[in-house]
Image (cartoon, rainbow, N blue to C red):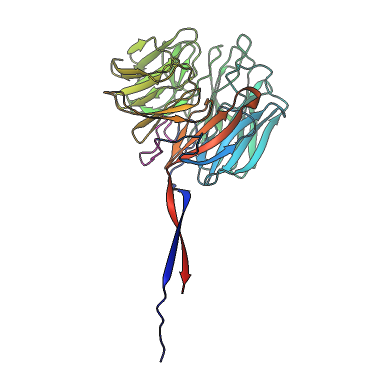
């Protein structure tokens, strides 16, 4: 007779720090999938973390060199650009998304860094763009704007010299990120010299499809493509105007004389209206109709110079250079609230994730506030290093930060993943 002995399962529970990882979304370039710095509605980034004591820090990876570009999150990988002064190189970095491990570094340019840029700028400020097949990486180097198409495995598809870039009056460097629309990748190369313009290149070959001449005027704004007033529009501000073009042909749709000469931020929109802020030489925030029929709808004197605005339906948020947060009604510019968060300055743009705004100060603190127009509601202040220039990115349940720890020659940059790190039981079975 067969006898079945009972098996006693002894479960020994220990605890280990494990993040809850759930992947569904990508972050394909500057300001995310829609170009408005809105994370997916399913994104649930953490509210609280602390880089100093490791609270809700999933991983932290040291970076070679320095840069202001934001992470691009594609499937199981994260991509970031950097520049190293010691080797005079500009590179694309690849990281494993789950562990943060640096997988590879591909040097694209060496020995051709500009001799002079603004001390608050970097030689790796533009964020790459992804079209589902290749990454498109822009660098200012060798007195020109260069665009490279790279596969995620590091194979160069093509590289082209888009335009001369030789600023004369203000040698502050470059910062415009590329944007993709269908089969063209669009690059702004605006400076005080011949060839200043917006260029569209074929994503497969790198050949120029169209070029729009722009005024001889140093500008730092990234173009963006959006659907406004029932039409796809390529939008950019600067040179004392807000301009709209057809992204596939370069045809001018409308131009409103507004804003100021030099703009760093990307325009924001709410479906009907277009907003931008800047401050050289004239400081202000401006709003025009998305069809270009009124100039302007409203303006004020609040200066958000390097950082972009962030719009939701009928309202727009701005973080001024002095650290004061604002909310305005887009229809008429009425201020619904304002609150000082910090003493300034600020370089990173605010991010919307799960009805919360993530606001990174240049001093390294990330503030989380409710993205509501009727009141100011501070949810958390998070220690995130000693400096932040790059804009945060939120994908799924993680917030990715490019931060600096230390100052001067001791400054070290890190790519940091924050998430809700919980205590999970580790189960071991033993049969008796």
- Tell me: 158 left or right of 315: right
> Can you give x and y, in whole percent of width and height, for residue 28 in the image?
49, 37
Front position in the image: 58 or 143: 58
- Tell me: 296 left or right of 191: left
Q: In which quarter of the image is the N terminus?
A: bottom left
Q: Is residue 35 magenta?
A: yes
* Residue 331 against residue 414 in the figure, above or below: above
- Tell me: 46 left or right of 102: left
Q: Is residue 389 magenta?
A: no
> Can you give x and y, in whole percent of width and height, for residue 369 in the image?
36, 28
Query: Which segment is the magenta one?
Result: 33-47
Magenta region, main secondary structure: loop
* Residue 336 against residue 157 in the figure, above or below: above
Outermost residue on the left side: it is: 374
> Can you give x and y, in whole percent of width and height, for residue 431 in the image?
46, 72
* Residue 405 against residue 54 in the figure, above or below: above
Seen at 43% across and 43% down, the residue is 25
Front position in the image: 430 or 199: 430
Outermost residue on the bottom side: it is: 1
> Can you give x and y, in whole percent of width and height, for residue 319 in the image?
41, 20
* Residue 421 against residue 293 in the figure, above or below: below
Seen at 56% across and 28% down, the residue is 404
Question: Is residue 364 at all visible to an observer of this figure?
Answer: yes
């Amino acid at each position: 007779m067969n006898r079945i002995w009972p098996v006693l399962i002894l479960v020994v529970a220990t605890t280990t720090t494990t993040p809850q990882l759930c992947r569904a979304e990508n972050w394909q370039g500057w300001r995310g999938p829609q170009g408005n710095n809105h994370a997916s509605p399913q994104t649930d980034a953490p509210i609280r973390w602390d880089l100093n004591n490791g609270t809700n820090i999933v991983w932290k990876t040291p970076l070679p060199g320095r840069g202001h570009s934001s992470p691009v999150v594609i499937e199981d990988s994260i991509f970031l650009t950097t520049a190293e002064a010691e080797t005079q190189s500009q590179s694309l970095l690849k990281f494993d998304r789950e562990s943060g491990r640096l997988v590879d570094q591909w040097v694209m340019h060496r020995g051709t860094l500009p001799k002079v840029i603004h001390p608050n700028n970097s030689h790796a400020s533009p964020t790459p763009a992804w079209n589902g097949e290749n990454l498109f990486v822009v660098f200012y180097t060798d007195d020109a704007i260069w665009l490279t198409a790279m596969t995620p495995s590091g194979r160069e598809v093509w590289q082209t010299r888009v335009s001369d870039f030789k600023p004369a009056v203000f040698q502050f460097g470059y910062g415009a990120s590329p944007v993709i629309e269908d089969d063209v990748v669009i690059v702004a190369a605006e400076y005080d010299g011949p060839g200043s313009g917006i260029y569209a290149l074929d994503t497969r070959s790198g050949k120029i499809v169209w070029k729009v001449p722009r005024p001889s005027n140093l500008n730092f704004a990234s173009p963006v493509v959006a659907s406004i007033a029932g039409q796809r529009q390529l939008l950019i501000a600067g040179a004392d105007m807000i301009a709209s073009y057809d992204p596939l042909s370069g045809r001018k749709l409308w131009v409103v004389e507004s804003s100021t000469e030099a703009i760093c931020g990307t325009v924001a929109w709410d479906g009907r209206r277009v907003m931008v802020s800047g401050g050289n030489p004239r400081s202000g925030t401006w709003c025009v109709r998305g069809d270009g029929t009124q100039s302007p709808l409203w303006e004020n004197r609040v200066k958000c110079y390097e950082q972009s605005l962030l719009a939701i339906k009928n309202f727009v948020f701005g973080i001024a250079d002095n650290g004061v947060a604002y909310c305005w009604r887009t229809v008429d510019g009425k201020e619904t609230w304002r609150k000082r968060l910090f003493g300034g300055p600020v370089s990173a743009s605010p991010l919307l994730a799960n009805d919360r705004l993530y606001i990174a100060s240049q001093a390294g603190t990330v503030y989380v506030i409710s993205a509501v127009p009727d009141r100011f509601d501070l949810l958390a202040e998070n220690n995130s290093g000693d400096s932040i220039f790059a804009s945060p990115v939120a994908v799924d349940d993680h917030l990715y930060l490019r931060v600096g720890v230390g100052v001067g020659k001791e400054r070290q940059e890190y790519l940091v993943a924050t998430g809700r790190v919980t205590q999970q039981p580790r189960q071991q079975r033993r049969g008796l």
